Amino acid sequence: MGLDANGARFLLHARKLGAAFDATLMIGRQDLHATKEQLLGLVQEYHDVCVDDAAQRMRESTSEFAEDFIHCLGAATVDSMDHSDFEGAALCHDLNEPVPDSLKQKYDVVLDGGTLEHVFDVRQAYRNCMEMVKVGGHYLGISPSNNFMGHGFYQFSPEFFFEAFSPANGFRISQVILFEHRRNAPWYEVVAPADINSRVSLKNSERTYVLVVAERVADVVPFTNPPQQSDYEAAWDGATKAPLRSMRDATEGGWMTALTENVRRIQCSLLRRSYFEPLYFRRIR
């Protein structure tokens, strides 16, 4: 994958959430699929988190890769890692294998723009990325979710990230976002399943991406104890807290809001459009 307009916007959004890009590692050397006009528009929209000459840098850039754009976010160093150097990656490493100690805690941002779903040993691949992030730094992920079968080995549920990037593994989730791959698609912040005592699910027919911003908060070895799905973990612990399942539980508007949402759900079904349940998803743009 590479950075299209949504991907570029996501990096700017992560910068607003506190990610510092000083030393950045791209997992896979990311192409730029956004047009120059789109990038200049985003730089203008997010001018408060870009370097002063970001617009001029974008106008002058002739690279097909994302380094110049990431420099606009304040990066002094932008490295890339891939299995081979076929796209000119700075570092060659098979992410099925542990990274060397010299790379651990080296980067302020480790960005997966759509690579880890192609790595068979997904546990080792994510451990590698997590270990290369400095304490106080961020992991940023753009990964396939629904309707990407055949693209790679895997497509990911949001719960994977909530459980993988947990305090037990030295991380804290700042935000998980879903959006569909279509023009002007809205972005939805995903509620952590453990917070509502329920699985968070989506059935749709559009290719859907999951975006992740996670901060490293402690120097611990990830996955010393494998993550478990939150509802099973609660059941094994004998938790009795009831799931929040009704629309009324999900909103503060009472029965009128619940009725409105039920009508919207029916309309989406009749029009064959995706319905993002407000219990699980909060629209943010």
Image (tube, helix red, strand yellow):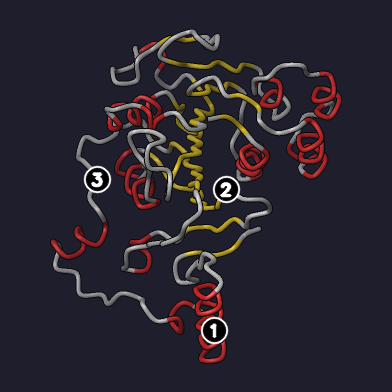
Identify which residue, 253 or 29, lies in the foreground: 29
Identify which residue, 274 or 162, lies in the foreground: 274
Residue picked out by circle 2: 181
Tell me which corner region of the image, top left, top right, bottom left or bottom right, holds residue 154. Answer: top left
Tell me which corner region of the image, top left, top right, bottom left or bottom right, holds residue 40. Answer: top right
Residue 280 to residue 252: above or below? above
Residue 262 image position (x, y, % from top left): 50, 83
Residue beneath the point at 38% across and 12% down: 93
Disc 2 marks a residue whose amino acid type is His
Disc 3 marks a residue whose amino acid type is Pro
Residue 191 to residue 122: above or below? below
Q: Give neighbour class at mark 2: few <14, some 14-19, many 20+ (Cα, 10 Å).
A: few
Q: Give neighbour class at mark 3: few <14, some 14-19, many 20+ (Cα, 10 Å).
A: some
Residue beneath the point at 69% across and 30% down: 73
Residue picked out by circle 3: 227
Residue picked out by circle 1: 263
Left or right: 170 in relation to 254: left
Q: CA distance from mark 2 to mark 3?
A: 29 Å
Disc 1 marks a residue whose amino acid type is Val
Badge 2 marks a residue whose secondary structure is loop
Badge 3 marks a residue whose secondary structure is loop
Q: Earlier in the sequence, mark 2 or mark 3?
A: 2
Q: Marks 3 and 1: which is nearer the front?
A: 1
Question: Do the numbered discs 3 and 1 sit on residues whose CB atoms are within 8 Å?
Answer: no
Residue 210 image position (x, y, % from top left): 48, 47
Left or right: 52 in relation to 96: right
Q: CA distance from mark 3 to mark 1?
A: 38 Å
Which of the numbered marks, if any, corresponds to residue 210? none
Quadrant that contains the C terminus: bottom right
Residue 111 image position (x, y, % from top left): 51, 30
